[in-house]
Amino acid sequence: MGSAAPARGHTSRSARWRDPAGWSLRTRIVAIMIALLSVLGLVVGGTAEIFLHESLHSQLDDDLNELRKRISGPGQGQQGMPGPSKFRMKLSEAIADGPTGAMGTGSIVVVIPDDGVPGGGLVQPEETSTESDRPGDNTFAELSPEMLATLQSEVQVGEKADVDLGGSLPAYRVMAAEINGEVVYLGISLGKVNSTLVTVAVFTGCVITGSLLIAGWGGALIVRRTLQPLDRVAATATRVSELKLDAGEVRLAQRVPEADTDPRTEVGQVGAALNRMLDHVGNALEARHASEMQVRQFVADASHELRTPLAAIRGYAELSRRSRQVLPDEIAHVLNRVESEAKRMTALVEDLLLLARLDAGRPLAQDPVDLTMLAVDATSDAHAAGPAHYWQLDLPDEPVTVIGDGARLHQVVANLLANARTHTPEGSTVTVKVGAMPNAAVIQVIDNGPGIQPDVVPRIFERFARGDSSRSRAAGSTGLGLSIVHAVVTSHRGKVGVQSRPGQTVFTVMLPLGSPPVVPTAEQRPEMLQTAR
């Protein structure tokens, strides 16, 4: 099991290298450069090899032509000699006096006279005479009938061709010529020519391979240095992508350095375009923040101004209801409805005002708060408000204490219990669980109701978020309870989340142990509307 992961990683890397689409820009540029240089090297090397081949063959052809002229010319001291002896003497003189390195041991001289009986063969030296200072005359080793037949079939009179006689003999450059009515085949070994071609090819291949390695190494360094501005542009974009742009005042101070925004270069054009885009995004974020602040200020002002008239409406309704004069039933019912709706609207205004104050960064109290007693009090209040539900407590043996605003934390638990009571049917069980982790206190509110629809969970902590109609509504709701929970918990540097499925919904609040809450300013405050993760 332990070796499976490395094997998969190795397979993934191998597949990435096999797929050019996954290569980086640097790798692609260097690979294309190496490919072009390889093609250029092959073209140059191949051209040089072909030229050398033709040049060496041309030299052999010139040697063969020179030998033909010598054989066909008059010989010295040949008067009075019979025809075959005279011709043999001319062949020996031509071979002895021919171009240096042209005809010699291993060459071929074959004469086909009129009677059709071939003479000559493979040139080989006789033993050196001790009575003379000159080397021994050349003699001829006979060629097999198959070799002679190959010569006659592959080389026509007046032509030159490369012939492979087989056996242990190398290939030959052979010329067929008619001299004094006899067909003469002259052949020079291609061993040295082929050896030279192979040597040059190997040397050229080594030079090209070494040049490619040096070019690849140097090209990689040059490409890396050339693309460094693009790396800086990418680093700037990465830093911007890591900023929280969804809420609050965002200052986009990140910009591509001026040295990397030269419009005369492609990378500079990208850097300049990115800076322009960041300017536009920054202006848009500033406009959005200003709009948000105006809306928050309006909500705070409106909520504050509505408190007085709402209190007056409730007071007049209560005063009229307590009048000594007997009111008609219809008027009494209307006054009761007015007072009830005034109370509901007052609760809504108070919630909006609380959120506005939290958004504005109002300081919270920093006192020790016993979460176990807070859970007991909140559960008792919930039991009084919802006697048809079953309320349970799961508390630790030791108190769990945090530093914070006791009234606001009580409101957190009360809102979670009210949410459970409102959105679960009568007879449901709601459990409040308090515990502690190494660095955090945990409060959980668990119910066995129908659960929350999956599409509602991501926005459950947004303001005025409404659950699906399948969740029971025995009482009204402003839609601000859970958003207040999220705002208060966030102000205490905590986290709140929810997990839900049919038959169980769990709200979890985590608060830091023993450290006072830090209340950020309105500009620094994270968005209260996003769902806790």
Image: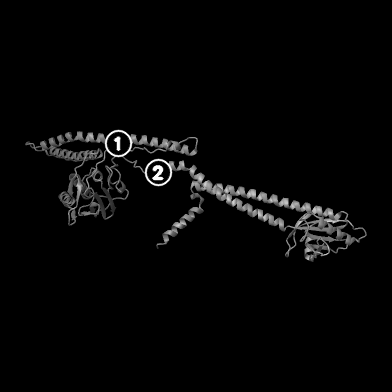
Image spot of residue 475 (x, y percent): 20, 46
Q: Residue at x 73, y 52 (%)?
A: 56
Up-down: is 328 above or below 202? above
Q: Amino acid at mark 2?
A: Thr
| 141 sits to left or right of 254 | right
Name the image quarter holding residue 180.
Answer: bottom right
Image spot of residue 432 (x, y percent): 20, 53
The answer to whether the residues at label 1 and label 2 have Cβ atoms under 8 Å apart is: no
Q: Residue at x 70, y 51 (%)?
A: 52
Q: Residue at x 15, y 39 (%)?
A: 339
Helix, strand or loop status at disc 1: helix
* Along the viewing direction, whichever of 429 and 305 lies nearer the viewer: 305
Q: Which residue is mark 2?
A: 238
Q: Which disc, if any, is residue 292?
A: 1
Between disc 1 and disc 2, the foreground one is: 2
| 469 sits to left or right of 80 | left
Helix, strand or loop status at disc 2: helix
Image spot of residue 84 (x, y percent): 88, 62
